[in-house]
Image: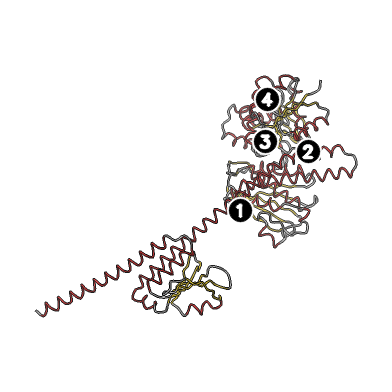
Amino acid sequence: MGPLFLIVEDDLQISNFIKFSLDSQGYSCLEASTGKAALNALANEPVTTIILDLGLPDMDGLEIIKKVRTFSDLPIIVVSARDQDAEKVEALDAGADDYLTKPFSIKELLARIRVIFRHTGAQDKEVQSVYKFADLEIDLAKHRVMVRGKEVHFTPIEFNVLALLLKNYGKVLTHKYILKEVWGSALDNDVQSLRVFMANIRRKLEENPAKPRYIITEVGVGYRFADE
Amino acid sequence: MLLAAIFSSTLTSKLISAKEKANAQEKQAQTLYEITSSLAKTRSIKEVISDSMQCLSNLFGCDVICIITGEDSKKLEAKTLQKNTGNLHNGELDKDQLNEFIAQYYSVPIHVQDKKVCIICLPQEVADIKQENGYLLDSVFMQITIAIEREYLNKEKESAKIETEQERFKSNLLRAVSHDLRTPLSVITGASEILLHRLDNPEDINVAQGIFEDSIWLTRFVENILSLTRIQEGRLNVVTQLEAVEEVIAEAIRQVQKHSPNHNISVNIPDNVIFVNMDSKLIVQTLINLLDNAVKHTSPEDEINVAVTLDSDKVWFKVSDSGTGIEESSIDRIFDIFYLTDNHRTDAKRGMGLGLAICKAIVNMHGGEIYANNNATGGASFYFFLKR
């Protein structure tokens, strides 16, 4: 059976638009306009992915994420307005997999879904060890990074950050998440040192750090490894 | 004995003159008190003026004329108070005749905040009184000036209050409208995008492309209005933290290239990582607006460049292009709200006025400044600084 999406969105027009986009790719969808209806659908249907608007009439979208995470790992893509940065970060920290900012294009939506499918597929397999891109080759097992044919030295922390981003290829990781995973703590002022590490990593990987191809900054949210 | 008589008479005359002096002083104090208390009760500039005229007429027992000079018209309002009847008569005076007219009188101009509000004309004889009794006359006019000034400030405060309320109403309305536009715009953008993918006929695709591009333009416009209303109301408190300049620039370029992939944007930044205190979202928006503006005024083969340079205490951001440039006459006003240049391409390149106004508002909020000029080699440059 193919994937089944649950679209949780109180605005019928937007919900229709998302459904339409997913239909066009041959995916099946359910729609829920309230948090209650969403939880009901989750209990009764074999939902594989949730697309969730944070602003619902009866419930905070964040609550739904927390509830879902108590019993399931199924991917959640959050949809939010542009001035809801704080909510976005909270949603990601609560366990959402990715986010889209309104208005988003079908291209963006489908790209996020592809990333999610790659991750859910990868979980069953062995963790990938070698990543190859146009001018980049990274071997996680051997701790080796080749940039345009030359080996580049990475400090252990820099390498750990890079490895974390690669394992979550395409997915946005919040500052807090990266700090927790790499340093084991997440104090607010550590974000500053994370920025310095990211700047150094960018200088080692990118041809032009101000027009990065791999290490993408999501301002106010976190970082994402991509191949743009 | 004689000596004693002379002594006592001098003493007596001294006593008498002292008593006269005391009487005169008491009268002055009484007059001043009357004027002050009567002026304290007035409720408008008009009332202050008529009350002052009444007091002056009582004090000197003469006719009083007051010429209102505040208004900027050819005819001046001239009020005359007749001492016998106590009637206030309104007349007019040609502005050209003003100097000639006041020369006939002992005239005292009343200034409030460096502005001449009115001229009070008294008979020439009053000048003689002034010689003996300058203190009283000065005090009276000072009281009048203070009273007029008070009413002036009240009036200003009142109109400022009304203006603030109107502003608030305007931005509330703008915000409500903009907010409600967001959702339908999302739907229009999405639906036209779906059509773009589904249609085969090139003409149909063109139509859908038009809807798609304009809906994106409108979406940015709406976001800009929302930001501007928030900035103007001071609700958007800048929460600054140290941010890496390169990350902010990269994000802005990425956003712009999403919709304008054919324009080439080059970047020059110093090798070292630069951290600046800022609200990153807002500075990203500033850069997006400047880059969008550059894209609008260039063709894909033109150049767009973002450069960062360092001063001892400032970080300069510069967005320059080799496009059509800014009309020289409009450079000064280019950051004004809703100002659109009369540039021949304006019609096809809408909305720059608001975008640039927001840039200025954001940069100013950060304690920086923003400037625009034309390059010697063609095209325009916009640059702003943030404090390090």
Residue B336, x across and y down, in percent:
65, 56
- In this view, the residue in front, B28 or B178, is B28
Chain under disc 3: A
Residue A72: horizontal and vertical position, in percent?
A: 69, 20
**Dot 2 amino acid type:** Gly
Instruction: Please tell me the numbered disc located at residue B287.
Output: none
Cα distance, mark 2 to mark 3?
Answer: 36 Å
Q: Distance between the residues labelled 1 and 3?
A: 32 Å
Q: Is mark 4 on a helix, strand or loop?
A: helix
Secondary structure beneath dot 2 equals helix
Of the residues tagged 1 and 3, which is closer to the observer? 1
> Element at badge 3?
helix
Write down the residue under mark 3: A201
Give the foreground label among 4 and 2.
4
Q: Which of marks 2 and 3 is in front?
A: 2
Label number found at residue B190? 2
Q: Nearer the viewer, mark 3 or mark 4?
A: 4
Q: Establish if B248 lies above or below A111.
A: below
Mark 1–mark 4 distance (CA, rounded to whole Å): 50 Å
Q: Label 4 is found on which chain of the structure?
A: A
Subunit of label 2 = B
Query: In what quadrant of the picture does the N terminus of chain A appear?
Result: top right
Give the chain letter at badge 1: B
Provide the residue designation for mark 1. B369
Residue A166 in percent (x, y) is at: 71, 29
Q: Which amino acid does label 1 sit on?
A: Glu
Q: Distance between the residues labelled 2 and 1?
A: 38 Å
Three-letter residue code for mark 3? Ile
Which residue does the numbered mark 4 point to in the structure image?
Answer: A36
